[in-house]
Image (cartoon, helix red, strand yellow):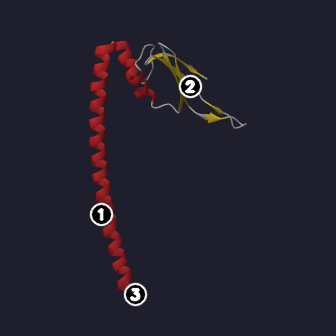
Amino acid sequence: MYKEKKKRIKNLELKLLADNELLEDSKKELEQEEETLNKIDDELLEKVNSIFGRENAIKFNNRELWIGMPAFLALFCKGNPEDNKENVTTDTTTEYWYYGKWKTSHGNVKYKKQIVVVNKLVASWQDL
């Protein structure tokens, strides 16, 4: 019985060492991916600066919106909306993006923020 316990302990030690090695490898991989993402962020920030100007690049870097911001940049800053609605007319497409979903005590769904996008440009936003 003593030999079996000793063998089990040795096996557990080996498994822990292997798991620790895997964890260290995963940490290194994550650091490399973060470095790559940071480079991509920097390049995107430079492009936003050259196209939309320094003031809007600062807003973009702070994940803030501006009137006239392209919808794809707004999605980059705020993420995908939790809900959206669309209104299409002959020459205008208006999208309503909703963020911060919550339920009232009566079970009704509400949102904390609405972003209005007209023809792929941010037209307004408001806290609800």
Q: How many other residues sit within 10 Å of disc 3, few (<14), some (14-19) or many (≥20)?
A: few
Nearer the camera: disc 3 or disc 2: 2
Residue positioned most to the front: 90
Residue positioned most to the right: 106
On the image, the x and y values in percent for residue 27 come to 31, 49
* Left or right placement of residue 69 versus residue 41 in this view: right
Residue hosting label 3: 1
Which is nearer the eye, 73 or 55? 73
The amino acid pointed to by label 1 is Ala
The amino acid pointed to by label 3 is Met
Which is nearer the eye, 57 or 111? 111
The amino acid pointed to by label 2 is Lys
On the image, the x and y values in percent for residue 53 come to 33, 12
Dot 1: what SS?
helix
Nearer the camera: disc 1 or disc 3: 1
Dot 3: what SS?
loop
Whether residues under marks 2 and 1 lie with C-beta atoms below 8 angstroms apart, the answer is: no
Picture quarter containing residue 99? Answer: top right
* Left or right placement of residue 76 versus residue 102 in this view: left
Measured along the vertical axis of the image, is residue 12 above or below residue 88?
Answer: below
Residue hosting label 2: 113
On the image, the x and y values in percent for residue 61 come to 37, 23
N-term-proximal mark, 1 vs 3:
3
Figure quadrant of the N terminus? bottom left
Residue hosting label 1: 18
Q: CA distance from mark 1 to mark 3?
A: 26 Å
Figure quadrant of the C terminus? top right
